[in-house]
Amino acid sequence: MSVATAQAQIFSVRNLNVWYGSQHALKDIELPIYKNEVTAIIGPSGCGKSTFIKTLNLMIQHVKRVRMSGELLYQERNLLDQGVDLVSLRKQVGMVFQKGNPFGKSIFENVAYGPRIHGMSKKKELEETVERALRDAFLWDEVKDRLHTSALGLSGGQQQRLCIARTIATRPEVLLMDEPTSALDPISTSKIEELAMQLKKDYTIVMVTHNMQQAARVSDRTAFFLMGELIEHDETGKIFSTPNDTRTENYVMGRFG
């Protein structure tokens, strides 16, 4: 596992609060996220994990009656200030959801979609970008002979890796993964975990997971959320072996959740 320094932070979350109407969903969250690491977000259902990860690229703004306060610093800029370019932000901070959601287009067009939106139009450049993204997502060898067939014909695990390829095709800095293996079989899950550990060389990854073993296997750091509060965060080995808070210990030991 890597050793991070203050200079290596890509996100610095300070006193972050999120409300849905009168519901206080996140309470005074303080959490650094370090470059080129996998940070696992764990906790029981309804604890605020998905709310937190969707705040990192401001997707939470699509929810009605949402309100936020505090500081959400990305590259030292507070994303909660007015005037943030959401298109640019989501190019830099991409997201992969629980279930693969490819467009009803060809495999090639799924991956080329983002680069096209951001102005890439030359055929050779697009072809090189699509191949790079598919290779980086461990999918190229499986689909290279059917790039122009429908992505909907892929298996569930392949669809999820395609969505990862689609996300990294625009070369983001951060990859958010909201329970990316929850709908997958063990073999596909293993491939996604291996992929995450490879991708952190080039990307910063924040992964929400219900799977304690997964968090222990793939992450450098782990943050434990409970009822909207961040109870504890530390290097993953410490969270799973000698946590500071008994609530963390009870959760990682399977005593609740």
Image (cartoon, rainbow, N blue to C red):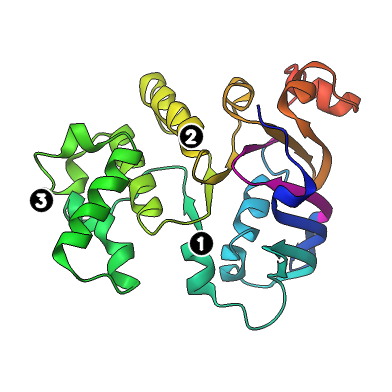
* Residue that extends furthest to the bottom in the rendered view of this protein: 83
Which percent across, then down, holds residue 100? 36, 44
- Mark linked to residue 247: none
Mark 1 is surrounded, within 10 Å at the Cα level, by few (under 14), some (14 to 19) or many (20 or more) other residues, namely: some
Residue 29 is covered by the magenta coloring: yes
Amino acid type, mark 3: His
Q: Nearer the viewer, mark 3 or mark 1?
A: 1
Which percent across, then down, holds residue 237? 73, 21
In this rendering, position of residue 62 left or right of residue 172: right
Which percent across, then down, holds residue 163? 35, 47
Cα–Cα gap, marks 1 and 2 = 17 Å
Question: Dot 3 lies on which element?
Answer: loop
**Residue located 34% across and 52% down the image:** 166
Which percent across, then down, holds residue 214? 57, 24
In this rendering, position of residue 176 left or right of residue 240: left
What segment carries the magenta color?
Answer: 27-44
Residue 172 is covered by the magenta coloring: no
Q: Is residue 251 above or below residue 229?
A: above
Report which residue position mark 1 lands on: 92
Report which residue position mark 3 lands on: 148
